[in-house]
Amino acid sequence: MTEKRMTIFVMAMLLISLALFGCSDSTSSEDEWQLVWHDEFTGSAGQLPDADKWGYDIGTDWGNGQLEYDTDRPENVSLDGNGNLAIVARAESYQGRNYTSARITTRGLFEPTYGRFEARMKMPWGQGIWPAFWLLGANIDSVGWPQCGEIDIMEYRGQEPLFVHGTIHGPGYSGPQAVTRRFSLVNDRFDTGFHTFAIEWRPNEIRWFVDGRLYHTATPADVSGEWVYDHPYYIILNLAVGGSYVGPPNASTVFPQTLLIDWVRVYRAVP
């Protein structure tokens, strides 16, 4: 074999090796997920969400100054008949409050540790409206908040329809000191169509996505206190009215306000 042919042969083998290495890396186990739990919200209009999957937090003011009373009534949380769950905030006098809404959870029903959590949703819009898709540490009764940990997959201020936030709260970095990042749409709004919000939660890492775009990563090096994301958490979907994060509604806020959820899906990483 001539020197020139030998050089071409070596270069070709090198390119093949690089290509194979790249394929192996792009299909690593970290990117392989198996569906383990989901709700597609199919059913008749007015039907309550599946009781085998969802329970309710009933009451008011969960520590953030919300103004609504959360119920388990179909007027506040039910299927819309078009494959969505509708959580509806209403301006009405109920149990001493001027607004009603709903807050549903998988507490005691589904409490995984790690995985990919995602939901496809359409936001409401208006001053003082506060929808969220989040995880809360299942040990909250024994250790309290924020020691239990909180992972906000999607948090949204109704008066800021271009932005959502991904956040973690833990001991030493909760409330205004939380580890957070904002994602903004370009030439679009979150209240005009459906978008998919997700996290990939692994040991020592949480990554946030909107419509498949990674925009935020948190690791133990990013927190000023203890990393508390290594135990079971449960899912919460809610639509708050008022509170410290958004302020109260005003004269421009139109009711009812509706958060639409097309589906919620949870995957586990395949070894």
Image: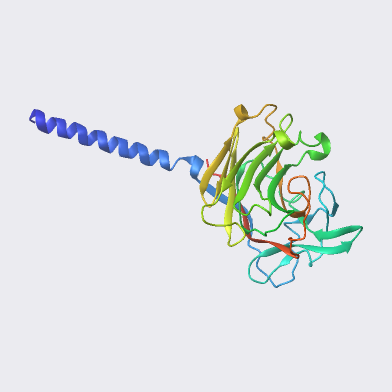
Q: Nearer the viewer, residue 88 or 57?
A: 88
Q: Quadrant of residue 169?
A: top right
The image position of residue 268, as x and y in percent, is 58, 46
Is 249 above or below relative to 79? above
In the picture, measured across the screen, residue 217 lies left or right of residue 179, that is left
Q: Residue furthest right?
A: 96
Q: Residue at x 63, y 45 (%)?
A: 165
Q: Choose top left, top right, bottom left or bottom right for residue 225.
A: top right
User: Residue farthest to the front?
Assistant: 251
> Can you say whether 250 is above or below 14 in the image?
below
Which corner quadrant holds the N terminus? Answer: top left
Q: Could you tell me which residue is drawn at 49 percent across and 41 percent down?
A: 29
The outermost residue toward the left is 2
Q: Nearer the viewer, residue 84 or 194?
A: 194
Q: Give percent across and percent down for residue 70.
A: 82, 57
Left or right: 118 as drawn, with respect to 79: left
Q: How is the image coloured?
A: rainbow
Counting from the top left corner in percent of width and height, residue 179 is at 65, 35
How many numbered marks are there? 0
In the rendered image of this protein, does residue 51 appear above or below residue 141? below
